[in-house]
Image: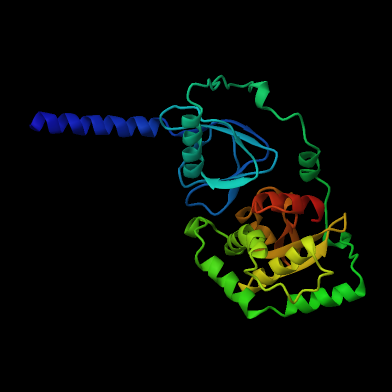
């Protein structure tokens, strides 16, 4: 009996050593993918062969690709951009896709020259997004009429009780990374944005008081700004270069601590000593996509 227990212990020990010697690794990446390591407060760019932990958070821009190898040595399917997930969530999603793809060959021949069949053909969006050109708030141009501006200002400063209650319920019940995410304002902004389109369609938010002349993305921008203010996040509403409404919100983080938000300086702008994020109001509930689109257009 003692020999059996000893054998089981040795097997467990060897398994643990094997697990430690085969961490989750990045096999291939394309684009400016960021990672927030577990227990750290600053983001960094993800590099090939970087060892990953399950609680690490990965942020993928719209034009990006990522392939991981799990602790068992399995090469997981390609992940595409516009997401922000923990490594654990990526692994689980990748394993689910592997099950779905049983019987279909998945190439694992990734080395210094990645397989060309998964590479994008190029994107003007990514080129503009990562341009070194400085973009400042002085470039904003307001195109609303005086009448519309007065209506917008009225709604931004008068928040219905139902809207405030809804916003507080959403952030109170959100499960977004909880204590692992260093910035409360971004967490609130993400959760409120993800539910916004559904809330508008199902009449959860009071919108009857908004004139019919204010519709579409402008109505969404007003409501989103109201929701942010309801949970103590300073916000502003402006328009992009195409006269489309966008919402900016204050992260509450000073310029010298930018890495607590991102290492991609094109994703934030400075206003009154703190860093702000711009969010596009195009139809989507994907906060990361809306963030990248917004930064491309206005910041």
Q: Residue at x 63, y 60 (%)?
A: 198
139 relative to 287 in the view: left or right? right
Q: Position of residue 191 (x, y in %)?
A: 59, 60
205 relative to 127 in the view: left or right? left
Between 266 and 123, the one lying in front of the other is 123
Give the mark count. 0
Q: Residue at x 48, y 49 (%)?
A: 38
Between 256 and 175, the one lying in front of the other is 175
Q: Is residue 202 above or below residue 287?
A: below
- Which quadrant is the C terminus positioned in? bottom right
Q: Residue at x 67, y 64 (%)?
A: 200
Q: Residue at x 58, y 52 (%)?
A: 42
On the question of residue 20 being in view, the answer is: yes
- Which quadrant is the N terminus positioned in? top left
Q: Residue furthest left?
A: 1
Q: Is residue 97 above or below residue 260?
A: above
On the question of residue 251 being in view, the answer is: no
Q: Position of residue 63 (x, y in %)?
A: 70, 38
Q: Is residue 72 above or below residue 109?
A: below
Q: Position of residue 163 (x, y in %)?
A: 63, 74
Q: Position of residue 213 (x, y in %)?
A: 84, 69
87 relative to 241 in the view: left or right? left
Q: Quadrant of residue 161?
A: bottom right
Instruction: Report the colour scheme.
Output: rainbow
């Amino acid at each position: 009996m003692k020999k059996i227990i000893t054998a089981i212990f040795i097997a467990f020990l060897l398994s643990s050593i094997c697990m430690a010697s085969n961490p989750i690794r990045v096999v291939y990446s394309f684009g400016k993918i960021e990672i927030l390591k577990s227990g750290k407060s600053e983001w960094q760019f993800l590099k090939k062969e970087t060892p990953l932990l399950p609680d690490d958070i990965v942020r993928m821009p719209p034009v990006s690709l990522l392939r991981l190898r799990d602790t068992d040595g399995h090469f997981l399917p390609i992940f595409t951009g516009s997401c922000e997930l923990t490594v654990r969530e990526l692994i689980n999603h990748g394993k689910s896709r592997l099950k779905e793809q049983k019987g279909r060959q998945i190439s694992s021949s990734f080395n210094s020259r990645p397989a060309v069949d998964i590479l994008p053909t190029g994107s003007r969006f990514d080129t503009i997004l990562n341009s070194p050109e400085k973009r400042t708030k002085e470039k904003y141009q307001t195109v609303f009429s005086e009448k519309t501006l007065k209506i917008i200002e009225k709604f931004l400063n008068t928040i219905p009780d139902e809207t405030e209650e809804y916003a507080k319920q959403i952030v109170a019940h959100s499960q977004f990374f909880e204590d692992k995410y260093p910035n409360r304002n971004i967490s609130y902004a993400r959760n409120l944005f993800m539910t916004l389109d559904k809330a508008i369609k199902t009449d959860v938010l009071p919108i009857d008081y908004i004139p019919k002349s204010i519709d579409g993305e402008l109505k969404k921008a007003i409501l989103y700004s109201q929701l942010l203010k309801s949970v103590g996040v300073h916000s502003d509403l402006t328009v992009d270069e195409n006269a489309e409404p966008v919402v900016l919100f204050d992260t509450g983080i000073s310029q010298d601590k930018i890495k607590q938000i991102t290492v991609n300086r094109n994703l934030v702008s400075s206003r009154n000593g703190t860093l702000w994020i711009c969010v596009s109001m195009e139809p989507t509930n994907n906060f990361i996509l809306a963030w990248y689109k917004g930064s491309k257009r206005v910041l």
